[in-house]
Amino acid sequence: MTDTLTQPTSATSPFLVAALYHFVSVPRFDSLREPLQALCEENGVKGTLLLAHEGINGTLAGPDAGIQTVLAYLRAQPEFSALEHKESRASKMPFVRMKVKLKKEIVTMGVENIDPNKVVGTYVAPQDWNALISDPDTIVIDTRNDYETAIGIFRGAVDPKTKTFREFPDWVRDNTGLHNKPKIAMYCTGGIRCEKATAFMKEQGFDEVYHLKGGILKYLEEIPQEESLWDGACFVFDERVSVEHGLKEGEHRLCHACRNPITAEEITSPYHEEGVSCSNCYHTRSEDDRLRYRQRQHQIALAKKRGQKHIGG
């Protein structure tokens, strides 16, 4: 099954972006790395794919035909025959290179024996999400990290303010008040983190655990803005930085010193220096750090003059 989007800007946005994940047992996952790497490179596809015993996760971008070729190859593998993906468009190639990586987990929680193939929460379609999170018997939890929640969040959601997904299990254990309401509703960017989080919550004894199918991306694609309970933009892990309702490219930029999204207003801050610092990281970096970043930024500028893309950019 494929989740697709036809955007009005597609004619001027030549790159197709495909976000995908699938929890499934893949004992031979390491044997898939080289063929996938070669196939992506042959078809002009860039991005990142993570392979592990528990499945596949990643985002790819490239020409439509190239993306469809890679997806067809994946679905031809028995383990990934039911693979779903979500599509959006990008006006520029949002990745610098193609990386297929072998991992212990396709999304790193760091808790042993959590398997969404065995125990998982209840999927909730975007069309039913508003009713669930508006129910006073529901606690809504954002399973993303603080730099993501800083630019957008569902109305009324609890923000754990985690730095990494590894912190989420301890946050749950420390917040005993989560048991005060019968329903837990969780969400993330594309669905993978909240799917694993629901499996963990079930293991912790929570009965009614729900998660948004397709994540924020699917919600922003399908729910009209006038009906939406989403405030802000959604951080994405590529050079677009953020997307908004209708999966339109957002206006955020990335600070290449700390990798945090920054707004147009933050770009005018005296702490902002392109590629060197922003108001989020200026006070946490040393002058030696900033010197290194300036040297890198100088190399990026030189590469741009030559019509090349510097790998550090």
Image (cartoon, rainbow, N blue to C red):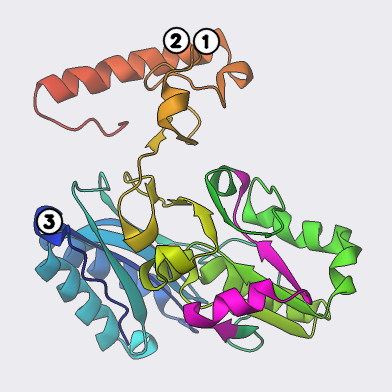
Q: With respect to residue 7, does 309 lie above or below?
A: above
Q: Residues within 10 Å of mark 3 (few under 14, many from 20)?
A: some
Residue at (51% x, 76% y) in the render: 53
Residue 67's place in the image compared with 47, above or below, is below
Position of residue 311 measured from the top left corner of the image (x, y, whole percent): 27, 34
List x then y, in percent, for residue 141.
Answer: 69, 64
- How busy is the neighbourhood of tag 1: few (under 14 within 10 Å), some, or many (20 plus)? few
User: What residue lies at 68% left-to-right and 60% top-to-bottom?
Assistant: 157
Dot 1 amino acid type? Asp
* Residue sticking out furthest to the front: 226
Q: Secondary structure at mark 3?
A: loop
Q: Earlier in the sequence, mark 1 or mark 3?
A: 3
Q: Kindly identify which numbered label has been placed on residue 291.
A: 2
Quadrant location of residue 185?
bottom right
Instruction: Work out which quarter of the rendered image holds the C terminus and state it.
Output: top left
Marks 2/3: CA distance?
A: 37 Å
Q: Is residue 303 magenta?
A: no
Q: Which residues are magenta?
A: 123-146
Q: The disc labelled 3 sits on which kind of residue?
A: Pro
Q: Secondary structure at mark 2?
A: helix
Residue to which mark 3 is pinned:
14
Disc 1, disc 3: CB below 8 Å?
Answer: no
Q: Which residue is mark 1?
A: 288
Q: Point out residue 9 in the picture as x, y percentages from the top left corner.
A: 17, 57
Question: Looking at the image, which residue is at 71% across and 76% down?
Answer: 135
Q: Is residue 26 left or right of residue 209?
A: left
